[in-house]
Image: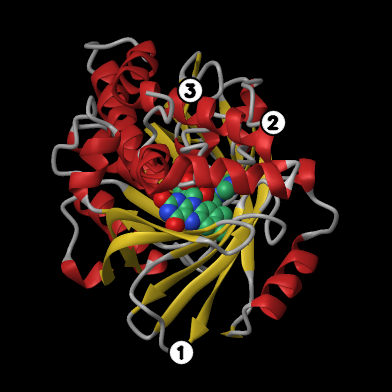
C-alpha cells in the first residue's frame, strides 16, 4: 500500500495565489508543500501580462495591506506604460491615464514560486490533484493528508469542486499569444463585436506585444477560433500559438472556507469583473491565506479569519466592479448602445471603471 504523506499546509496550484500562500505560510513556520500540475511553472503563458504599478494597486484597493508583496525585480518588467487606449465599436479612441507595465508571466510566476521556496516551502511540479476525500488529497503522485488544504488551482478548481464550494458560473473564454513587431507603447483594448461582452487587446512589450481576447458566451455567435480569426483580419499581426483558459467573471464565490480548506485567487473568483485582471488580487489574497493558515496551525486564528480579512481588504472594489459589469451587460447586446455608453463615460469615467470605482459618482 502506498504511504500517506503528511504536511501542515498543502497548496494546490503554483500560480500567483498559490505561491504567495506558500511563501507566507512557510514564513509563519508551517511545513508547506505546493503542487503544480504543469511540468514548468508559468508555461505556456496564458495571460495579457499587464500589471498595474503599485501606486495604481493602492488606488484600486485602498484597504489592502500590500506589505512587500509587490517588491519585484526590475527584470520582470518588459515595458512601462502611462495610459490605456480604449476603442469603441466604431473605433473612437479614449486615452485613459493609468500607470502599468507588461511583465514576462512565465518568469513572473517562476520568481514567485522561487520566493516561496526561499521562505521554506517545497514545490513539486508535474503533480496533479484529482480529488479530496475524507480529508485525504489524491494526487497523480500519491495521497497527501494536510492540516490545511489551499485550493489555488484556478477557475476550474478541483479543490473547490471536491469540497462542494461554489465555482464561478460566468467563465469567459480568454486566450493570448505573442506578436512580433514594433508597437506604440500604449496598451490597446477593443470593444464591440470583435469580442462580445469582453474585449480584444494589444499590449506592447519590449520586442513585440501580447495580444489576445476574451468574450462572454452569452453574446457570442462563434467560438474562440472564430473571434481570433476575425480579430486577425481586422488587425493583421505576426502571431504565435494561442493559449487560453477561462476567466471567472461572476465575482467572488459566496464562501471561500470550508472545514480545514480554503480557496484563493481565480479558484475563489477574486478577479476584477470589469477587466478580468486577477494577478494583484491573487497575490494580496494569497498573502492573507498563508498568514492565516500558519496562524491557525499555531492556534492563533480560525480559518474564517481569511474570509473576513480578504473581504475587508479587496471585497469592496470587487463588488463595485461587479456592479459596473452588470451595467455594461445591458449595453453589450447592441453595438449602438455600447457606442453611446462609451461616449457618455469618456476617459474619466472609464478610468474609474478600470480602477473598480463607481462610474455613477
Ligand atoms: C488569456 C488571459 C489573459 C489574462 N490577462 C491578465 C492580465 O493581463 N493581468 C491580470 O492581472 N490578469 C490577467 N488574467 C487573469 C490572471 O491570469 C489570473 O487572475 C491569475 O493568474 C490568477 O492567479 P491564480 O494563482 O489564482 O491562478 P492561476 O494563475 O491560473 O494558477 C493556477 C495554477 O494551478 C495549476 N493547477 C490547476 N489545476 C490543478 C490541479 N488539479 N492540480 C495541480 N495544479 C493545478 C495550474 O496549472 C496553474 O499553474 C488573464 C487571464 C487569461 C486567461
- Describe the element under mark 2 as helix, strand or loop: loop
Which color mode does the image show?
Answer: secondary structure
Closer to the chain start, of discs 1 and 2, is 2
**Above or below for 14 versus 294:** below
Label 3 sits on residue: 261
Q: Is mark 3 within 8 Å of ligand 1?
A: no
**Above or below for 284 versus 220:** above
Closer to the chain start, of discs 2 and 3, is 2
Q: In x, y percent, where is residue 357?
A: 37, 30
Left or right: 180, with 138 as reference point: left
**Above or below for 350 versus 309:** below
**Above or below for 79 versus 97:** below
Q: In x, y percent, where is residue 128?
A: 59, 50
Q: In x, y percent, where is residue 244?
A: 63, 61
Left or right: 144, with 1 as reference point: left
Q: Residues within 10 Å of mark 1 (few under 14, many from 20)?
A: some
Mark 1 → mark 3, Cα distance in angstroms: 46 Å
Count of picture labels: 3
Mark 1 → mark 2, Cα distance in angstroms: 37 Å
Q: Quadrant of the C terminus?
A: top left
- Describe the element under mark 3 as helix, strand or loop: strand
Label 1 sits on residue: 181
Quarter of the image where one finds residue 221: bottom right
Quarter of the image where one finds residue 223: bottom right
- Describe the element under mark 1 as helix, strand or loop: loop
Mark identifier at residue 169: 2
Amino acid at each position: 500500500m502506498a504511504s500517506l504523506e503528511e504536511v501542515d499546509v498543502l497548496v494546490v496550484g503554483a500560480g500567483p495565489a498559490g505561491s504567495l500562500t506558500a511563501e507566507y505560510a512557510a514564513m509563519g513556520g508551517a511545513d508547506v508543500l505546493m503542487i503544480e500540475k504543469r511540468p514548468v511553472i508559468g508555461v505556456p503563458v496564458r495571460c495579457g501580462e499587464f500589471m498595474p504599478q503599485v501606486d495604481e494597486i493602492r488606488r484600486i484597493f485602498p484597504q489592502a495591506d500590500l506589505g512587500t508583496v509587490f517588491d519585484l525585480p526590475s527584470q520582470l518588467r518588459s515595458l512601462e506604460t502611462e495610459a490605456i487606449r480604449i476603442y469603441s465599436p466604431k473605433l473612437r479612441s479614449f486615452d485613459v491615464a493609468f500607470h502599468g507595465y507588461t511583465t514576462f508571466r512565465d518568469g513572473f510566476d517562476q520568481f514567485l514560486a522561487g520566493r516561496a521556496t526561499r521562505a521554506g516551502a517545497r514545490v513539486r511540479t508535474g503533480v496533479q490533484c484529482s480529488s479530496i476525500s475524507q480529508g485525504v488529497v489524491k494526487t497523480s503522485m500519491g495521497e497527501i493528508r494536510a492540516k490545511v488544504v489551499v485550493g489555488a488551482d484556478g477557475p476550474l478548481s478541483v479543490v473547490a469542486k471536491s469540497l462542494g464550494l461554489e465555482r464561478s458560473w460566468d467563465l469567459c473564454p480568454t486566450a493570448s499569444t505573442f506578436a512580433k513587431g514594433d508597437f506604440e507603447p500604449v496598451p490597446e483594448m477593443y470593444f464591440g463585436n470583435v469580442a462580445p461582452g469582453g474585449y480584444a487587446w494589444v499590449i506592447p512589450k519590449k520586442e513585440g506585444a501580447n495580444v489576445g481576447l476574451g468574450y462572454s458566451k452569452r453574446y457570442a455567435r462563434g467560438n474562440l477560433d472564430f473571434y481570433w480569426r476575425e480579430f486577425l483580419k481586422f488587425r493583421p499581426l505576426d502571431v504565435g500559438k494561442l493559449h487560453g483558459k477561462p476567466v471567472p467573471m461572476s465575482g467572488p464565490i459566496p464562501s471561500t472556507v470550508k472545514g480545514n480548506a480554503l480557496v484563493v485567487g481565480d479558484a475563489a473568483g477574486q478577479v476584477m469583473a470589469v477587466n478580468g485582471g486577477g494577478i494583484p488580487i491573487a497575490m494580496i489574497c494569497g498573502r492573507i491565506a498563508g498568514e492565516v493558515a500558519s496562524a491557525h496551525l499555531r492556534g492563533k486564528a480560525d480559518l474564517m479569519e481569511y474570509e473576513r480579512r480578504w473581504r475587508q481588504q479587496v471585497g469592496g472594489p470587487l463588488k463595485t466592479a461587479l456592479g459596473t459589469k452588470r451595467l455594461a451587460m445591458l449595453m453589450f447586446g447592441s453595438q449602438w448602445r455600447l457606442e453611446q455608453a462609451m461616449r457618455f463615460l469618456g476617459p474619466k469615467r472609464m478610468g474609474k471603471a478600470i480602477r473598480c470605482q463607481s462610474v455613477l459618482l
